[in-house]
Image: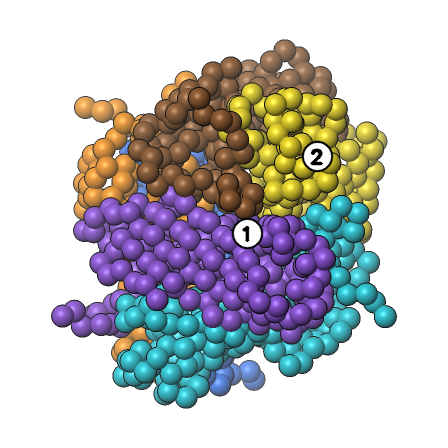
Chain colours: A orange, B blue, C cyan, D purple, E yellow, F brown
Amino acid sequence: MTKKDFTHLDKATGNPAMVDVGEKKLTQRFAKASCKVVLGKEIMQSLNDNSELITKKGPVFQTAIIAGTMGAKKTAELIPLCHPLGMDDCKVTIEAIGEEEILITCTTKVTGKTGVEMEAMTGASVAALTIYDMCKGFSHDILIKEVKLEEKTGGKRDFKR
Amino acid sequence: MTKKDFTHLDKATGNPAMVDVGEKKLTQRFAKASCKVVLGKEIMQSLNDNSELITKKGPVFQTAIIAGTMGAKKTAELIPLCHPLGMDDCKVTIEAIGEEEILITCTTKVTGKTGVEMEAMTGASVAALTIYDMCKGFSHDILIKEVKLEEKTGGKRDFKR
Amino acid sequence: MTKKDFTHLDKATGNPAMVDVGEKKLTQRFAKASCKVVLGKEIMQSLNDNSELITKKGPVFQTAIIAGTMGAKKTAELIPLCHPLGMDDCKVTIEAIGEEEILITCTTKVTGKTGVEMEAMTGASVAALTIYDMCKGFSHDILIKEVKLEEKTGGKRDFKR
Amino acid sequence: MTKKDFTHLDKATGNPAMVDVGEKKLTQRFAKASCKVVLGKEIMQSLNDNSELITKKGPVFQTAIIAGTMGAKKTAELIPLCHPLGMDDCKVTIEAIGEEEILITCTTKVTGKTGVEMEAMTGASVAALTIYDMCKGFSHDILIKEVKLEEKTGGKRDFKR
Amino acid sequence: MTKKDFTHLDKATGNPAMVDVGEKKLTQRFAKASCKVVLGKEIMQSLNDNSELITKKGPVFQTAIIAGTMGAKKTAELIPLCHPLGMDDCKVTIEAIGEEEILITCTTKVTGKTGVEMEAMTGASVAALTIYDMCKGFSHDILIKEVKLEEKTGGKRDFKR
Amino acid sequence: MTKKDFTHLDKATGNPAMVDVGEKKLTQRFAKASCKVVLGKEIMQSLNDNSELITKKGPVFQTAIIAGTMGAKKTAELIPLCHPLGMDDCKVTIEAIGEEEILITCTTKVTGKTGVEMEAMTGASVAALTIYDMCKGFSHDILIKEVKLEEKTGGKRDFKR
């Protein structure tokens, strides 16, 4: 059994270091992350008045979808030890969950030597921050909660929550 | 009383649009955001073994502090309708909260026409994503919970949670 | 009368060089650029079927508006000798002109030592390229024509077409 | 026959979305875009005095060539739904067309799952904006006209104007 | 007398941290950095054949000048704890020093709360790396030696070598 | 024997141009660059007091390691004619050399059509600039010297100093 460890700390020095993926094979990798944003009833009602919730589209949600997609592409710039990667696909979706919350999902795919879970996590986070930015004129009492990985496949170990 | 509204939607067309701050005065602005990350006992124990928790520094926390600071500087690139701003200060701190969680705090300052709350929120989020990236070798069962604004001053309305 | 010249070529060496604005005053500056894109009847009809033209919003136009706004913020990264600037405002609008074309307008404002006409030109161009990207599934016979400055105020010489 | 459609709109929701190229094969792809810039006789004469036109090089043209090449590399950062791609080659050329105009050409190559036509279009556009920036000390009566794709090969459908 | 210290380490925790310049005054700041690159006789001869050395311009030097200028603008993105700043001016010059070396100089100006010495150092370094990149087809036996600050004014303490 | 030449100048026009690597094979490539920074006894003593030198880690060195790694990932953005590349690995190490200097090493790996020597050179340079930035509170009499390529393998010609 492999001993679990901080993969981003160099064994010899303990300093932060990228993982060497030079010997790994190219495989098709997939990841899915999600995030909830608690907006409260007033903002949700305003989104509804603006047809965002019924149509699942509209200017607030679409701005967040685009920001999340562009944010996912910036992952290797933001996260110090992430490998620079291409991406085969990135999708962001947003929907209402009950009367006070929305659920953001970001899925990513790549054919590469390393996974795209950080890309999915980053895409979901940037979409959530964008929702926050666009709704903060109502209130700063908004909570981004539960950014988490839902699923990943194609690497050494698959993961599903 | 000002009617609350989506400040980032153009009144005439309903399309996404930056807020015009041309007539606003330069003021000293401050914001503070926080974020909790649930790592679980195994990772917390490993961080402890690595002296991260006692010293409040170490390679994992320091990488996250630097990533958060650099991420805060990238806010206007990530959030579509944020104004490009300088920054007078940005500080990221990380500490253990109980046996399973850490608390990330990001404070930002600017002398500008608009606030730095998105910078603080983005800095905290990128620090959290970096912690996730550096600990995911142990487990993907990590939860970024509760990214939220704690405080802002210097704008039209102060906010404190 | 000031002799007109290549302001971005160093007098002594003839090499490319930024203009020194150290002694210039901060003034409120405004610029407006426009761009026409010839899409042809088929794509225009499809945009119409998708309600983009009537509502002047929708996913294609909104993606272009956001890309144009974000592109304007990247001007100093793209144009080698542009000064890095903040921005007080940036608006992108898109509308149909007749049966085959759309008109993109980008307005920018800053309180600064130098103008924002390159920001307006860049914003309009990136919005146009985004429209192209989103419509090229129909045809590559799309023409971005007439990117031009419409107006600028606040500098040494105002300009209006 | 494939029904033409907005490839960047999600079939289910109508929201903007990247195209999934996960199942596509790597092929050698090529694209060529062009752009004309109407500078007028005075600027053209000054470029001539500066030997730019005869030698086809010089500080103005070379700055634009470099900006166009670097701009092409930034395509996936600028155009929201473009895939992040490597690039095997990117060339920008500039030449005089008659007494008032110049012609910018940008060619791009990649071995990838998706084409590089947006890279060629972006490279030509950024080169044109740079020419504009460097000549605007003479006059703002400069027109960037006819940014268009000239040719693409290596994808599902070749295109040649 | 002020005790000298690591200004980028937080007093309380010892962790890396930006310096708070919120209370500092805007002053006109200037910095000059230089860098020598040892190219060797063969490359210098080829630059000479290409007229780079006599004219002090040409494609190799101009590409480096532009890269250095654009690199200086990226300083706050590259150096983790640098404040994001505007810039009033940035000039890069290159000249031959004897038969084997060139000297790169980068001067920067800003009206700001903090200095632009890192911008000048970064500009000189990126210009040198670009020279290296463009000459490495001859030989990798090229040495970037002596990147250093020559002068700074406008802050708490002026410096001149 | 291949005639040596400026590989980044277009044969026909003499203008700067990317090298076309479309026909090259993917190979495993490695590069190693190094850089010395002369800090002087006072700063070295302070680093020692801070345990940086003994442990070879600590906030100054770790910040530089992270900046160097992130800087290496930005190479194609900084160096105009570099190809955009992924990276399989990037490691930065820092150690004391005698009483006044430190030695920075950056190694890079990719499976690609072109080498990663510019990435290694850029990583070492950005790490050095970061060290400079963090120590300049003591003195600006710091010298970045001898940025050079130590080794490269995997391309047409291997190199080892």
Label 2 resides on the chain identified as E
Q: Position of residue E3 (x, y in %)?
A: 77, 30
Query: Could you tell me if residue A141 is visible in this image?
Result: no
Task: Please give the name of the residue rendered at 21% of the width and 69% of the height, measured from the top-left corner.
Answer: D11
Query: Could you tell me if residue F115 is visible in this image?
Result: yes
Q: Closer to the observer: label 1 or label 2?
A: 2
Q: Secondary structure at mark 1?
A: helix
* Mark 1–mark 2 distance (CA, rounded to whole Å): 21 Å
The picture quadrant where one finds residue C134 is bottom left
Q: Which mark, by number, is residue D91?
A: none
Residue type at numbered disc 1: Ile
Q: Position of residue C20 (x, y in %)?
A: 76, 54
| Mark 1: few/some/many CA within 10 Å (<14, 14-19, 20+) | many
The picture quadrant where one finds residue E51 is top right
Task: Please give the name of the residue rendered at 81% of the width and 29% of the height, measured from the top-left corner.
Answer: E161
Q: Which mark, by number, is residue D65?
A: 1
Which sits in the foreground, D136 or A160? D136
**Which quarter of the rendered picture does the N terminus of chain B lie within?**
bottom right
Which sits in the foreground, D115 or E17? D115
Residue type at numbered disc 2: Leu
Q: Position of residue C127 (x, y in %)?
A: 46, 69
Q: Determine the residue located farthest toward the left in the rendered image.
A: D1
Q: Which residue is mark 2?
A: E53
